[in-house]
């Protein structure tokens, strides 16, 4: 009998269904079983940063059972996930079973009578599992070292800097993090950039032209000089470009007067066929972004749904930054496309995508369905699967199939109308000539598409029926939402795909940021913390430093750099900055003043923070200890049950919803404002 060890019970059940018992016993550890203790640093700085790992409290029974099974079975097969976290779990299992020898900072196998195997797979299917069991690999110690280096780095930053925040703000639940604080800083710096942006008003002029039929065109030039002005400004996370025109209320009347009674003709027509190629298959971050854009799912929710699908064998491994697709999949996809849509939609040769991420591992795959015969998930096949699982699966299925379909062909038509005084208008049209991959990814757009045919030729005379103008304002950079924050983190090389969801959840749970509908904005607490840490540790909480650290961790994973050297190179300058900050006795006030009076003593109320969120407190505390919940009212909305007001509330998982001010007497709630009249 062979013992196969996995992380989750769901994964274990899928293994059992595939293996059907036989000579294997599958055991689930329920995640990590060994970690650094929470009550101390547990890093031996004098001994090459050696960590003092302990068995996690609620996993002691699991470990006892694991050791018992280890003694009963001569072959141990480690089948944890294929990334660094999975490799680390396998390492800790092997260590606890006495199969690994640790001579810090090196690891090696012990000579025992037991056989230890490590199997790696991208999907939980019978073929993949059979192939993995036939071709076991060695434990990848370089991945273990990279994971441990990250864990030690994060422990040092968190446990050394967090106490500084406690002293300066009087709150012992605050925390700082190597990646967490940079994510917070992106949001804080963006808010500053929005506040500093100077908006400008401008106008856009349109003309309605006639020659048998009407069509609308935009005024773009005068004497070959563009009205449109593009401006670029430098932001914390890169460049931002906005446009405006040089048309204002001051010069509008002169332009409109010039356009009256003019002679117009079509001076040029540009007609081109443009190929539109399908986007790459999903990586972790792309799936999280689309889950948000399409369905409003948080990154945490999308990852939970994807993990369920992976562990049940529906999709390949969901934590990846690779665009690679397995050879067997792309050829099966071609057959599927020919059968479903016709030969003209299929490629002659498979299409591949170049990995943009510096961290992408070539051996990994993108997220795709494991079976093309399963076009959709039918609710009821598995009692644990919901409509939300169905939505995520459909996204993954369609995206993967679309990558192997012909590109769409779109005819783009630009019609230029010139006046005798050298004013130039432009009208744009487009028409899908061949739908290609859009047949799968965006069929609704093809059905709704209505093209106004342009039947004019160059030199055709036109009559200007009327003009109109639109008043516009330059827009500052947008606040981040979950999708754009993840996109920025990935583009800048901050964190790993598996860390985005927990980071975003954490800075919300800590009340450093809050949602203004779909967008993030910093609280005063988050603003103060970000500003203090960025000044106190100017080289640590920057985009460049954090990205370089990710590159260095990748080098450790590839065996190109010693992880002790990485830790030492970080710790030496960090310790100097830390000691300087420990001697800084500045304190910060994070209270927010509000126009609210204390119901007990009539003094001003202020907004304070606890680990559970904002609350109102009397400014005369501790003389007056009056407090009340902080609830943001929604104007012009009334409870349909009792006529009370509507306020913003948050669930235990920090998901925003709307409830009645008369709770608990009235328990009305709604997820969206649109559902409340």
Image (cartoon, helix red, strand yellow):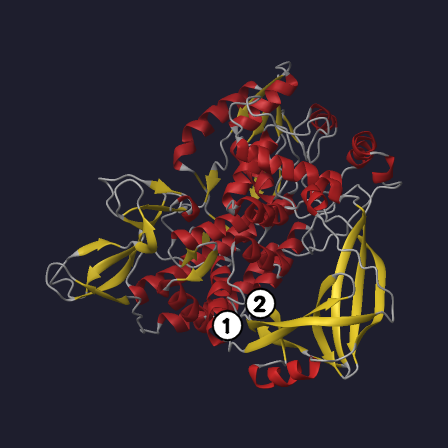
The residue that appears at 30% across and 45% down in the rendered structure is: 639
Q: Look at the picture and state if 125 lies above or below 153.
A: above
Looking at the rendered structure, the secondary structure element under dot 2 is loop
Instruction: Using the numbered discs, state the Cα–Cα distance from disc 2 to disc 1 in whole angstroms.
Output: 11 Å
Residue identified by numbered label 2: 237
Crowding at mark 2 (Cα within 10 Å: few <14, some 14-19, many 20+): some
Residue 95 image point, x, y percent: 54, 36
The answer to whether residue 350 is above or below residue 227 is: above
Task: Residue 193: give its label.
Answer: 1
Could you say which quadrant of the image residue 582 lies in? bottom left
Left or right: residue 175 compared with residue 260: left
The residue shown at (78%, 62%) is 212
Residue 669: where, in percent of width, then height? 34, 41
Look at the image and tell me in which quarter the N terminus lies.
Answer: top right
Q: Is residue 96 visible to us here?
A: yes
x%, y% of residue 446?
72, 45
Which one is in front, 584 or 239? 239
> Which residue in the rendered view is the most extreme toward the right?
348
Q: Residue furthest top?
A: 22
- Examine the rendered structure and indicate whether residue 439 appears above or below residue 541: above
Residue 342: x and y in percent read: 84, 34
Residue 59 - label: none
Residue at image position (87%, 71%) is 459
Q: Is residue 655 left or right of residue 469?
A: left
Q: Earlier in the sequence, mark 2 or mark 1?
A: 1
- Choose between 84 and 292: the one closer to the eye: 292
Judged from the image, the secondary structure of the residue bearing numbered disc 1 is helix
Between residue 602 and residue 640, name the one nearer to us.
640
């Amino acid at each position: 009998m062979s013992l196969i060890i996995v992380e989750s019970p769901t994964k274990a059940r899928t293994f059992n269904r595939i293996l059907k018992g036989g000579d294997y016993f599958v055991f689930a550890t329920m995640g990590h079983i060994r970690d650094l203790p929470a009550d101390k640093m547990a890093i031996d700085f004098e001994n090459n940063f050696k960590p003092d790992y302990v068995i996690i409290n609620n996993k002691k029974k699991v470990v006892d059972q694991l050791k018992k099974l280890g003694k009963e079975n001569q072959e141990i097969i480690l089948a944890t996930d294929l990334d660094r976290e999975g490799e680390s779990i396998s390492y800790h299992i092997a260590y606890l079973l006495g199969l690994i020898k640790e001579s810090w900072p090196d690891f090696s196998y012990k000579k025992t009578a037991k056989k230890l195997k490590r199997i790696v797979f991208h999907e939980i299917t019978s073929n993949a599992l059979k192939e993995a069991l036939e071709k076991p690999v060695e434990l990848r110690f370089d991945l273990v070292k990279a994971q441990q280096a990250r864990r030690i780095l994060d422990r040092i930053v968190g446990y050394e800097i967090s106490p500084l925040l406690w002293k300066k703000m009087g709150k012992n639940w605050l925390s700082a993090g190597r990646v967490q604080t940079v994510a917070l800083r992106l949001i804080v710096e963006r808010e500053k950039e929005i506040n500093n942006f100077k908006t400008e008003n401008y106008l856009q002029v349109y003309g309605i032209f006639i020659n048998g039929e009407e069509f609308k065109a935009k005024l773009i030039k005068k004497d070959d000089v563009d009205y449109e002005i593009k401006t670029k400004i430098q932001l914390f996370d890169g460049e931002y470009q906005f446009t405006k025109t040089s048309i204002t209320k001051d010069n509008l009347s002169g332009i409109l007067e010039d356009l009256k009674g003019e002679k117009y003709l079509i001076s040029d027509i540009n007609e081109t066929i443009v190929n539109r190629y399908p986007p790459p298959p999903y990586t972790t971050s792309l799936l999280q972004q689309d889950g948000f854009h399409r369905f409003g799912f948080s990154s945490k929710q999308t990852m939970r749904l994807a993990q369920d699908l992976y562990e049940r064998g529906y999709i390949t491994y969901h934590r990846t930054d690779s665009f690679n697709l397995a050879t067997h999949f792309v050829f099966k996809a071609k057959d599927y496309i020919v059968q479903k849509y016709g030969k003209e939609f299929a490629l002659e040769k498979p299409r591949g995508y170049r990995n943009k991420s510096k961290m992408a591992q070539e051996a990994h795959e993108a997220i795709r369905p494991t079976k093309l015969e399963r076009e959709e998930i039918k609710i009821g096949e598995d009692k644990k699967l919901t409509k939300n699982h169905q939505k995520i699966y459909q996204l993954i299925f369609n995206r993967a199939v679309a990558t192997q379909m012909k590109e769409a062909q779109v005819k783009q038509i630009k019609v230029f109308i010139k006046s005798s005084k050298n004013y130039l208008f432009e009208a744009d049209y487009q028409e899908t000539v061949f739908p290609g991959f859009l047949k799968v990814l965006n069929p609704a757009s093809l059905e709704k598409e209505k093209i106004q045919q342009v039947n004019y030729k160059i030199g055709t005379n036109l009559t200007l029926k009327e003009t109109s103008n639109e008043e516009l304002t330059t827009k500052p950079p947008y606040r981040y939402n979950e999708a754009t924050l993840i996109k920025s983190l990935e583009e800048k090389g901050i964190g790993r795909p598996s860390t985005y969801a927990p980071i975003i959840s954490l800075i919300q749970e800590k009340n450093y940021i809050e949602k203004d509908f779909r967008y993030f904005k910093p609280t005063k607490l988050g603003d103060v913390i970000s500003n203090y840490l960025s000044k106190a540790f100017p080289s640590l909480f920057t985009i460049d430093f954090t990205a370089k650290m990710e590159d260095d961790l990748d080098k450790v994973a590839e065996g190109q750099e010693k992880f002790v050297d990485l830790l030492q190179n970080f710790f030496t300058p960090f310790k100097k900055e830390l000691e300087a900050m420990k001697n800084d006795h500045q304190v910060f006030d994070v209270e927010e003043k509000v126009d609210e009076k204390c119901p007990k003593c009539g003094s001003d109320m202020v907004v304070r923070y606890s680990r559970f969120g904002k609350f109102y407190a009397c400014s005369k505390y501790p003389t007056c200890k009056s407090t009340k919940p902080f609830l943001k009212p929604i104007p012009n909305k009334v409870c349909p049950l009792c006529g009370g007001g509507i306020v913003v509330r948050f669930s235990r998982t920090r998901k925003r919803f709307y409830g009645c001010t008369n709770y608990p007497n009235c328990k009305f709630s709604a997820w969206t404002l649109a559902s409340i009249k």
